[in-house]
Amino acid sequence: MLLFTGLRIAELVALDVDDLSISARKGQLTVRRGKGERYRQVPVNAEARTVLDAWLAARRRLPGADGPALFLSLKGQRLSARAVDLAVRRLGRAADVSLSAHTLRHTCLTGLVRAGHDIVLVAELAGHSRLQTPAGTACPATPTDKPPWTASSSTTEQPPATP
């Protein structure tokens, strides 16, 4: 979901079942508690809707399925941001790539910018309060720059400062 929606990890784990609206043709997530307490709606593409449909079916069999949290642990508790980040990093290690939940968010936003979507719309989708935030971090300077998920990249590298 992080890769498909560009949500922050805290926004993802704060989602409730009622924040999801999906049908065969469209879907959206409502972020009620975004950074800075910002409210926004995020579209959900067809592939993500398929994954969410499968998750909702599996979720019904978990303890705590009658609760509001969209994403539950096997014990029926709301997933924590730490648990999600550890799972993503574990998957990255298994694939021999440097991967984090934040990398998935930025990969989503970078893909939108590179596909030619309006940077203002990408900023709104990302929940950024300033246009300069996605402009400086969402897209490497040149198309030949290595993407953040390559094995040789470091998760501690900082993007260059924008003038």
Image: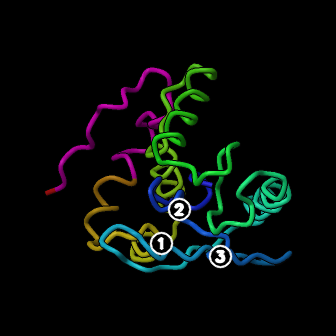
Q: How would you rate the neighbour count of disc 2 (Cα within 10 Å): few for under 14, some for 14-19, many for 20 or more?
A: some
Which numbered disc covers residue 28? 3
What residue range appears in magenta? 139-162
Q: CA distance from mark 3 to mark 1?
A: 11 Å
Which of the two discs, 1 and 2, sits closer to the camera?
Answer: 1
Q: For this rendering, which residue is in front, 131 or 129?
A: 129
Q: How is the image coloured?
A: rainbow
Q: Amino acid at mark 2?
A: Leu
Q: Are marks 1 and 2 in contact (CB under 8 Å)?
A: yes
Residue at (82, 62) in percent of width and height = 53
Q: Are marks 3 and 1 in contact (CB under 8 Å)?
A: no
Measured along the vertical axis of the image, is residue 163 above or below residue 120? above
Which of the two discs, 3 and 1, sits closer to the camera?
Answer: 3
Measured along the vertical axis of the image, is residue 56 above or below residue 24? above
Which of the two discs, 2 and 3, sits closer to the camera?
Answer: 3
Residue at (67, 70) in percent of width and height = 17
Q: Amino acid at mark 3?
A: Gln
Lateral position of residue 159 relative to residue 62, left or right: left
The N terminus - image quarter: bottom right
- Label 2: state its secondary structure: helix
Kindly identify which residue carries mark 2. Answer: 112
Kindly identify which residue carries mark 1. Answer: 125
- Label 3: state its secondary structure: strand
Q: Which of disc 2 and disc 1 is earlier in sequence?
A: 2
Whole-percent x, y for residue 41 in the image = 54, 79
Residue at (45, 51) in percent of width and height = 106
Q: Amino acid at mark 1?
A: Leu
Q: Which of disc 3 and disc 2 is earlier in sequence?
A: 3
